Image (cartoon, helix red, strand yellow):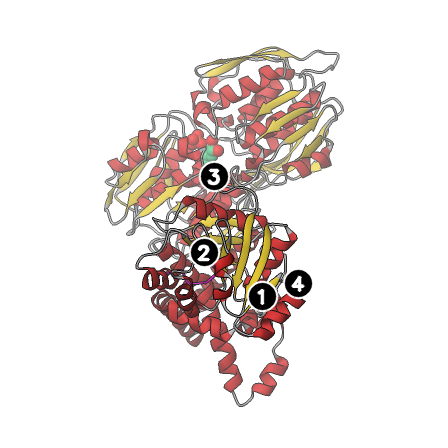
Amino acid sequence: MSAMDGAAGGEVSGQIGRLVVVGIGLIGGSLALGLKAASGCREIIGVARRQQTCDQAVGLGVVDRAVTDIAQVLPELEAGDVIFVAVPTLTVEAVFTQLKDNLPAGVTVTDGASVKGSVVAAAQNVWGEAPEFLVPGHPIAGSEQSGVTAARDDLYIAHRIILTPLENTAPAHIQRIQRMWQAVGAEVLSMPVVEHDEVLAATSHLPHVIAFGLVDTLAHDAENENIFRYAAGGFRDFTRIASSDPVMWRDIMLANRDAILKSIDLYTSNLGSLRSAIASGDSEHLMGVFTRAKAARDHFTKMLAKKAYTETMEAKEVTFIAQPGGAVNGDLRVPGDKSMSHRSIMLGSLADGVTEVEGFLEGEDALATLQSFRDMGVVIEGPVNGRVTIHGVGMHGLQAPPGPLYVGNSGTSMRLLAGLLAGQQFDTVLTGDESLSKRPMNRVANPLREMGAVVETGEEGRPPLKIRGGNALKAIDYTLLMASAQVKSCVLLAGLYADGETSTTEPAPTRDHTERMLSGFGYDVRRDGPRASLQGGGKLAACHIDVPADISSATFFMVAASIAPGSDVLLQHVGINPTRDGAINILRAMGADITLQNTREVGGEPVADIRVRYAPLKGIKIPEDQVPLAIDEFPAIFVAASCAEGETVLTGAEELRVKESDRIQAMADGLKILGVDAEPTPDGIVIQGKGASDQSAVFGGGEVDSLGDHRIAMSFAVAALRAGADIRIKHCANVATSFPNFAELARGAGMNLEVC
Ligand code: S3P
């Protein structure tokens, strides 16, 4: 389907001439009323078979005049006029027959029938081939009411109109019809005829079959009096469309027979499976169907409200306006750890039994992983307030997804899933958003190929990833080329399906949540310094997972409190895994006042409450061994460095160039705009801190671009605490990938952040 742009072209400009509506019912009458309201045409003439309808239409002001035979008006029509055929589908041919040989040149003919194949066939029967002035169309709007009295001038506002022009349809006629519909507030799209009829069979015709059929079934029941008396909300909602015009729907069924039969067969087979599940008490099957259906319906509701399921960069433009000054104070709990949330869904799905997760991050990235497993047949309840229940299917229980798995902005989803999917029996395709589509994937594709997997990437090793199923994997002993937990995890997860012992050796410690969580699920992972090994062919046992708050999200508030005089925050229940604590170490080395309280272990992960109070910072040379331990925290650390006294130098961090954006360049560009001397180097940055002990502004105001990178966006928002004027940050929608309630929490703590 493609959207048609609104540009006028050819001879068509301004309003259309006359509109002749053949069939003055709900659909035709509403176009007439809408065009009248929009002053979109010169005159409206109605055509109805019965004089009474004509009188009624004129009386109601729907048309200016009406006739019972179109032949009466054809001679007076001229170029620029439009005939809208809005009669039941199978009557269209009779109308075309009347038009044949009598239609003045330059008049456009269009229609509103719900089946386009039969309209094209009718045109071919009458004219030999569909004429260039015929623009088949279908307004996706209506109601169960019918007749001229149901017509409304706002029926088409914000509704879609699908045009199915043919090869020889003249562009000028298409544009005229497009403009006519736009005049009544509709959005016009175009689609091939066959595709239109298949889509409508599934989305409109099948629901009508079911509604008519259900009401008829109940109406025949001896108890129907009672059934109808007690049938409330659900019945009423579900069967509203069974009040629709029977002739119109009879025609649609006959005209779109093959596509409708296909939809009915698919539905019948699904209904059969539901019946068996109910009969055998298969609660899991029922939960599977119901949770998937609920997720899909909720998604659809958001789409209708013009909100994407995951409100991604493309879908929504968000700008942060961070006002200068302020401090951060209070007790805060930032959302759950992103890395652990991903892994909880992956391992929970492959486990035997039911895994309960608490503290799950309801951000787009982790939700993309969750949706992928739902697409592969796993029943997952929630998330509701961070709680997720995963009905594991066992190591070999995943099913082929119905299409490519779309993981949005999430590199972790794509790279870890690649490992798991390499071990499945079915083929999969992994795709992502614009940012992810630029990120390197050979780092996972290459070791997987060494294991015997068949993995194709896009150009230059970028997504999409196409993974062929059904290949036996062999264990490898893999030395990582870069310090990457995603690569390590990918290889280990593929190793679960490999024959023998798979090992990874990393050049520097990276986050070890995969190893820890595998152990938590009862899988034996041997660890020896930089080396992790596991034997393929084992099983995972369901467990309970308490996901701590994400130290990467907490870092924004650690930096905020460190740079803003008067700050004192307590960040609750934060994961302080030693492979993730680089930001604490680096900020402390810069002089930050950070204390860990109530240190404890939760589900195999160390956790603490982190208290941070304002303290003047000084620039440092960041030790390279801290880089992998703080890999996601550098954008925020650069803001701290700008507020420190003296120079901060980062080296050994070339990985930052291939994150959600090139974070070295993006931060250097933004910092310069805000008046900080920040020089990017190939593997790091040199920042001349402006931290004056007089606590004056460090940053000037200005507009910076986060490039759709969540961490860049949040870092510049924090910078405003020490700015002299507003910082406008563009492209912030992706903050929702890792920290959906950032703005709310930041405001609650004392930052002045406006989201628009
Ligand atoms: C992650 C690993 C890191 C990190 C990312 C999450 C993980 O990526 O930047 O945000 O969950 O394994 P790399 O493995 O590419 O360093």
- Please tell me the numbered disc located at residue 66: 1
Mark 4 within 8 Å of ligand 1, using the beta carbon: no
For numbered disc 4, what is the local secondary structure? loop
For numbered disc 1, what is the local secondary structure? strand
Q: Is residue 182 above or below residue 284?
A: above
For numbered disc 2, what is the local secondary structure? strand
Question: Which comes before the other along the chain, label 4 or label 3?
Answer: 3
Point out the residue furthest to the front here: 75
Residue type beneath disc 1? Ala
The residue wearing badge 4 is 61
- Please tell me the numbered disc located at residue 335: none
3D distance between C-alphas at marks 3 and 1: 31 Å
Q: Is residue 636 left or right of residue 473?
A: right
Residue type beneath disc 2? Val
Number of labels in the image equals 4
- Please tell me the numbered disc located at residue 109: 2
Residue drawn at x 37%, y 52% is 192
| Quadrant (top left/top right/bottom left/bottom right) for the C terminus | top right
Residue type beneath disc 3? Gly
Mark 1 within 8 Å of ligand 1, using the beta carbon: no
Quadrant position of ligand 1: top left
Residue drawn at x 60%, y 40% is 740
3D distance between C-alphas at marks 2 and 3: 18 Å
Q: Nearer the viewer, mark 3 or mark 1?
A: 1
The residue wearing badge 3 is 9
Residue type beneath disc 4? Gly
Q: Position of residue 27 (x, y in %)?
A: 55, 63
Residue drawn at x 46%, y 71% is 249
Q: Let me know if residue 14 is in the magenta part.
A: no
Magenta stretch? Answer: 109-117
3D distance between C-alphas at marks 1 and 4: 11 Å
Q: Is residue 166 above or below residue 47?
A: above
